[in-house]
Each structure stands twice: as structure tokens, then as C-alpha cells.
Image (cartoon, rainbow, N blue to C red):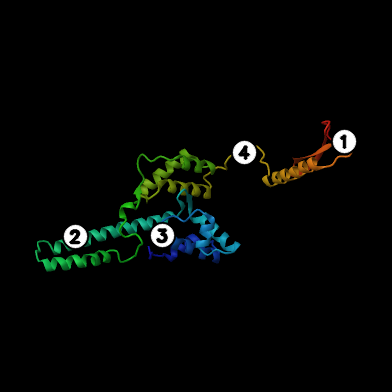
């Protein structure tokens, strides 16, 4: 889409917490979403490059906006409102085209004039184009591949990804799914991706305090950076032991590094097996 309506009041209501830099990042991301009519790329390097984010502040602004307004999916970063706008546009455009074709057919029904028929055939593409005058779109002859927004199916079920998404955030799937069904059924909501809509619902459950804090794994996690240091120091010590020229009668020993608390400590272990 090359054009979309911009509601200043709605935008300011939803984005009052953004910085000036984040406002610019959000508008850039919205423009890309509407122009390409597809989710934003997950690849961080591509996303930053294509949106001119060059320094740390600009990159962080994009990450903050993605966290606040987009949902990460396997297809990319999804914006539910943009999807609804794009879906509505294609639906209206198709209806306008069908109406124009019907008027054209009625106007020239029964005409056998070859000259008139040739003129009509020559002008038809122009008339079809008028039906799609505002907004313009990159997708003109691929309507069959466009996924349309639908209401929530009676047999809607969550997939494993959506269930895991809820569990990770401490959302009660049974309770929230009932509320999710009742709310959207009563509102007559339509979405192209109801699994993505559920993930947005989970985010709101956390935001408004309806989710419990996920149970944390009580098993202490090893500091990977500390482990990397220990492994590097151990490798050097082992190499030194292998290459060292021991004096005659000198008692040989190895240096062993271990992690204790938040430190890497060394211990001498003599070849007799006794530590010192």
C-alpha cells in the first residue's frame, strides 16, 4: 500500500510514552509494513539496516517500539492493526472492482458493434484501475494469495506455540482463553491470524496484572562468561603442564581451575593425587 489513513488522536493516545527518537522509529516501521504488506523481518541486522538505524540509541529505539506494538512470530514482527487495515483495503478494492465490472457489462450488454467492442476492451483496464485508485498497492493481480481476516471460529484451539507463549508469561490458559473467546465473539472481531491475536491478549494480561509471575527454575544457572574464563585458564594451564621442563626430583603438579561463587579459583593437584 502506498497510502493509509492516519488518525492523530488514536496515535497520540497510544504513543504518549515514546521519545522523539522512538516516534521516528515507529513511523518508519509502520511505513515499511504498509508498503510491503507483510511482517517485518526478524533478522535484527536486516531490520536495522533497512530502517537506517546506525547508532546504539537508534537501534534501541526500534527494539523498544517492536516490544510495545508488534508481536514476534515465525513469519516476522506482526502488527495486528496494520493487518486489519490491509485486509479491509483489499476487501473494499475487490468489491469496487466487481461493481465496476458489473456496470461495464450492463452498459454494453447486447452490443454487436465490433468497433464499440474493441473500444470497450481497450478501455477496460483503465476502468479496472480506477476501482483501485486510492490507496495504491503493490499487489494488483494476486488477490487469491491474500489471507483474509475472519471472525473467531467456534472450534478455535491454541497451537503449542501459543500455549507455550502463555505459560512463559504466567497466563492462565483456561481462564484467559474463555475471556478471549467471549470478548472477540461479542465484539465480532476479525483477524488474519488468531494465534497472533492470542499472543497479544497474553501480553495485555501481563500488562494489566492478570498474569502470575512464572515459576522460576530453582536450579542455579552457571554464569557462561565465568565458565568461559575458567575453560580458557584451564586450557592454558594444561598446555603449560605438557610443555614444562621439570627438574630432576621436582614433584610434578597440575593447576586445576574451578568456579566458586562468582570467582575462578585455582588449586594445585600433585601427580600423587594430593591437592594443595
Mark 3 is surrounded, within 10 Å at the Cα level, by few (under 14), some (14 to 19) or many (20 or more) other residues, namely some
Residue 255 screen position, x and y as percent: 80, 40
Circle 1 residue: 251
Give the spatial CA distance, label 4 vs label 3. Answer: 41 Å
Q: Closer to the observer: label 4 or label 2?
A: 2
Depth-wise, is mark 1 or mark 4 nearer the camera? Answer: 1
Do labels 4 and 3 touch, CB within 8 Å?
Answer: no
Question: What is the quadrant of residue 254 in the picture?
Answer: top right
**Quarter the N terminus occupies:** bottom left
Residue 65 image point, x, y percent = 52, 58
Q: Nearer the viewer, residue 170 or 159?
A: 159
Mark 1 and mark 4: span between their CA atoms? 45 Å
Instruction: Please state if 251 lies on the left or on the right of 159 as rendered.
Output: right
- Circle 2 residue: 102
Q: Earlier in the sequence, mark 2 or mark 1?
A: 2
Disc assigned to residue 224: none
The answer to whether the residues at label 4 and label 2 have Cβ atoms under 8 Å apart is no
Q: Are marks 2 and 3 in contact (CB under 8 Å)?
A: no
Count of marks overlaid on the render: 4
- Disc 1: CA contacts within 10 A as few (<14), some (14-19) or many (>=20): few
C-alpha distance separating marks 2 and 1: 100 Å
> Could you tell whether 258 is left or right of 134 in the image?
right
Residue wearing tag 3: 36
> Where 8 sits versus 163, above or below?
below
Which residue is label 4 attached to? 217
The quadrant the C terminus occupies is top right
Which badge, 2 or 3, is on the more N-terminal residue?
3
Q: CA distance from mark 1 to mark 3?
A: 72 Å
Mark 4 to mark 2 CA distance (whole Å): 64 Å
Q: Which badge, 1 or 3, comes first in the chain's sequence?
A: 3
Q: Secondary structure at mark 1?
A: loop
Q: Nearer the viewer, residue 216 or 112?
A: 112
Amino acid at each position: 500500500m502506498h497510502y493509509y489513513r492516519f488518525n492523530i488522536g488514536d496515535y497520540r493516545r497510544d504513543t504518549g510514552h515514546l521519545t522523539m527518537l522512538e516516534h521516528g522509529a515507529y513511523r518508519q516501521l509502520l511505513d515499511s509494513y504498509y508498503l510491503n504488506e507483510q511482517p517485518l523481518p526478524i533478522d535484527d541486522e536486516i531490520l536495522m539496516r533497512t530502517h537506517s538505524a546506525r547508532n546504539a540509541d537508534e537501534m534501541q529505539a526500534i527494539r523498544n517500539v517492536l516490544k510495545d506494538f508488534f508481536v514476534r512470530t515465525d513469519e516476522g514482527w506482526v502488527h495486528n492493526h496494520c493487518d486489519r487495515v490491509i485486509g479491509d483495503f483489499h476487501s473494499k478494492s475487490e468489491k469496487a472492482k466487481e461493481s465496476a465490472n458489473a456496470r461495464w457489462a450492463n452498459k454494453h450488454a447486447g452490443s454487436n458493434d465490433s468497433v464499440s467492442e474493441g473500444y470497450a476492451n481497450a478501455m477496460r483496464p483503465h476502468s479496472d484501475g480506477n476501482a483501485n485508485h486510492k490507496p495504491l498497492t503493490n499487489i494488483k493481480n494476486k488477490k487469491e494469495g491474500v489471507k483474509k481476516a475472519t471472525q473467531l471460529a467456534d472450534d478455535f484451539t491454541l497451537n503449542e506455540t501459543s500455549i507455550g507463549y502463555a505459560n512463559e508469561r504466567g497466563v492462565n490458559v483456561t481462564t484467559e482463553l474463555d475471556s478471549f473467546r467471549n470478548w472477540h465473539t461479542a465484539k465480532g472481531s476479525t483477524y488474519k491470524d488468531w494465534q497472533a491475536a492470542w499472543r497479544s491478549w497474553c501480553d495485555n494480561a501481563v500488562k494489566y496484572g492478570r498474569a502470575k509471575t512464572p515459576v522460576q527454575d530453582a536450579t542455579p544457572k552457571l554464569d557462561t562468561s565465568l565458565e568461559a574464563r575458567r575453560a580458557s585458564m584451564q586450557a592454558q594451564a594444561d598446555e603449560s603442564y605438557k610443555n614444562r621442563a621439570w627438574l630432576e626430583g621436582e614433584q610434578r603438579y597440575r593447576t586445576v581451575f574451578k568456579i566458586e561463587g562468582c570467582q575462578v579459583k585455582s588449586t594445585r593437584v600433585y601427580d600423587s593425587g594430593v591437592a594443595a
